Image: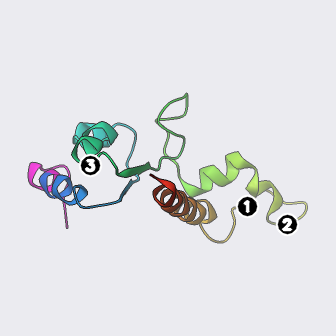
Amino acid sequence: TCDISQPSGQAIIKDLVKHCDIFMENFKVGDMKRYSLDFPSISSLNPKIVYCSITGFGQTGPYRDLPGYDMVVQAMGGLMSVTGEPQGEPQKVGIAVADLFTGMYATAGSDASKATAP
């Protein structure tokens, strides 16, 4: 376990990123900066690293501080309107599809970015 809220945990991460191709995180907006693990800090240690930050609503904009729960994303994206009983209330999909696809696309995008980097 690596506790990034502690200086010793931050030091472990900073040492590891010197030897990594991809750094992926899914903390709330501002957390990584507070721990000096944001893109400027990480890329100063490894300028060629691909930094992937996953948040529910991005780093900027009016919803950036909202939690990105799977059910919220399904509802806001309209997916819940096409599931459930025909005359019933909207229902979430049986599995956490937004979470699953987010991880899949973040991985594919990060891999593609690294594969096409000079």
Kindly check if marks 3 and 2 are in contact, taking CB atoms under 8 A apart as contact: no
> Residue at point 37% right, 49% down?
27
Query: Which residue is outermost to the left?
Result: 8
> Residue at point 13% right, 50% down?
6
**Where does the magenta region start and end?**
1-10
- Residue 83 location (% of width, % of height): 79, 64
37 with respect to 77 (left or right):
left
* Three-letter code for the amino acid on which mark 1 is drawn: Gln
Please state which of residues 116 and 12 is positioned toward the viewer in this rendering: 116
Q: Which residue is mark 3?
A: 46
* Three-letter code for the amino acid on which mark 2 is drawn: Glu
| Quadrant the N terminus occupies | bottom left
Label 3 secondary element: loop
Of callouts 2 and 1, which one flags the residue occurring earlier in the amino acid sequence? 2
Q: Which residue is mark 2?
A: 85
Label 2 secondary element: loop
31 with respect to 13 (left or right):
right
Label 1 secondary element: loop
Of callouts 3 and 2, which one flags the residue occurring earlier in the amino acid sequence? 3
Q: Label 2 to label 1, Cα distance in Å?
A: 8 Å
Kindly check if marks 2 and 1 are in contact, taking CB atoms under 8 A apart as contact: yes
Indicate yes or no whether the magenta region holds residue 19: no
Q: Which residue is mark 1?
A: 91
Residue 104 location, quadrant: bottom right
What colouring method underlies this structural image? rainbow
Query: In the displayed structure, would residue 2 be above or below residue 25?
Result: below
Please state which of residues 114 and 30 is positioned toward the viewer in this rendering: 114
Of callouts 1 and 3, which one flags the residue occurring earlier in the amino acid sequence? 3
* Three-letter code for the amino acid on which mark 3 is drawn: Asn
Circle on res. 56: none
Query: In the displayed structure, would residue 37 be above or below residue 63?
Result: below
